Image: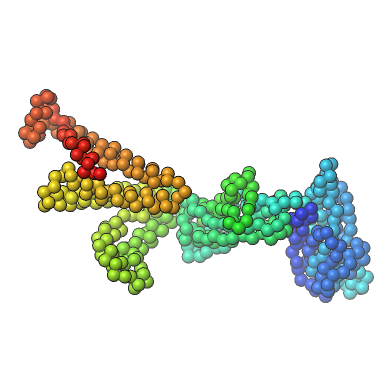
Amino acid sequence: AIQPKSAKLASKTMILARSGSVNEGVVVGYSVHIMDELAAVGSQGSQTFSPCTSETGLRGTSRTPGQMPSAKGYVTLGVGDVETQVIVQSPLTASGLPQDFVFRLNSIRFSASQKDLGLTAGLGPTVEATVHVAANSPGVLAWMLPSITVKAPEDCLSKKTCTAMVVRTGGCIGELKCTWRMEALNAVPDFDYVEAQGELRFAEGVTEHMVDFTVCGKRRGRVCDEFLLILEPHDACEVKFDEDGDGGADSSILAVSIKPTSVGSRVLRSIDAIVNLESVRKGNRDWLDKFPEAVLCNGSWEEQRSASVLDWGLHFFALPWKVLFTFVPPTAYGGGWVCFIACLFFIALVTAIIADLAELFGCVCGIPDFVTAISLVALGTSMPDLFASKAAASGDTTADASIVNVTGSNSVNVFLGLGLPWTMGSIYWAIKGRTPEWERRYADIAIRYDTNTAVFVLKAGDLSFGVLIFC
């Protein structure tokens, strides 16, 4: 029987059908291909097509959609044949262009010798297909549906392979290539689905391709998670995508929703919707993996075996810092906010340590705090920005990222690094009021204010001297 799908050729259409088994010369399943040659191809070779003489005749009708039949004939299948070819004249529109039409199989007729044997056969469940006449162009690629929903196995250790279809419309001349990849939304790779990517090749005349992807099992009490399947152009081939679809003319995007098999507890579903339990599982795994990576030289046992003396020296020098920052939670917790807050805390801690070390160094060497602040401390905080800006400029076509990093880091250092402590100091002294120590240290300023008023005092230094030392 003819399947309800078609592979388009230029000014002709191929109707694909399900092939069946052959039993004593009677074709149970068959295929019909609309081609531009009058030939029936079977296991015995090619034979001339004759509409009304056959060993097994399949009566067919072609008509335009919504119209009365416009052509009739017989599709011939010989003994042992599982498919045949027949030409059908496509109706024309008022402007003379080929028009889509419907092809239908009506009945089966046996030869007299087959009738005497009592052989029987019948049509399959699908006997009609709409034929779309393709344009003389390579066509455009798109996902068959803008979104799909798949059910995940209930066993979290199980996996399920699902399929999505890519279609080629508007023509099928020449070969097209494209790549596909997956991108997470709230679905978590390796916990909700298996990360994969690949390449699709559409040979001339091929209008459909299947993409297989794997989803992981979901426990009870989980909500639907989503990820994207994205089609993108291949480097070796110019490809156009459907402009009306997601992704526009540059790509094609399919949204995949992973639905749990059973609903489960409402409490668990509410918790999963807020914190994404699969993301927490991934965060736990990644966090545990960070500790051996910090302790081992170059991050793994394999790399440690081939480590050089320089690698070991750098490893022991950075080991305390690597172990310290291993306690920073991964970004999987709370949408990255837990990691962000922890990073601010650790940055403040390291800054305090560096400031104390610089102050101790200046005390030992007799260098004023002002000089160490604008030289050693400034150098230590600026070197990471320097390397980050250099890496960004080397890997990008423009210097936008480098400029933003330099100006942004300096702005943050000035407005937040100085502004926040000064604001906190002003609030502290406004609430606390005067003390004997404050009056003794700032006697010349105390006489300007009321007896119960205290302010945060910061004496200005020599700007020209500070700029000279910094440079």
Q: Residue at x 64, y 47 (%)?
A: 242
Q: Which part of the image, by quadrant, shows the N terminus?
A: bottom right
Residue 179 visible, this angle: yes
Nearer to me, 110 or 96? 96
Residue 119: image quadrant is bottom right
**Place of residue 345 in the rendered image (x, y in percent of width and height, measured from the top left):** 27, 49
Q: What's the image's color scheme?
A: rainbow
**Place of residue 448 in the rendered image (x, y in percent of width and height, measured from the top left):** 12, 24
Residue 58: image quadrant is bottom right
Is residue 172 found left or right of 94 in the rendered image?
left
Q: Residue at x 22, y 41 (%)?
A: 468
Residue 132 visible, this angle: no
**Place of residue 384 in the rendered image (x, y in percent of width and height, measured from the top left):** 31, 51
| For residue 422, above or below residue 13 | above
**Place of residue 142 in the rendered image (x, y in percent of width and height, measured from the top left):** 63, 51
| For residue 377, above or below residue 30 | above
Nearer to me, 164 or 470? 470
Q: Residue at x 59, y 50 (%)?
A: 252
Q: Which part of the image, by quadrant, shows the C terminus?
A: top left
Q: Residue at x 79, y 61 (%)?
A: 33
Is residue 382 found left or right of 199 in the rendered image?
left
Is residue 186 found left or right of 105 in the rendered image?
left
| For residue 40, above or below residue 347 | below
Nearer to me, 462 or 440? 462
Number of labelled discs?
0
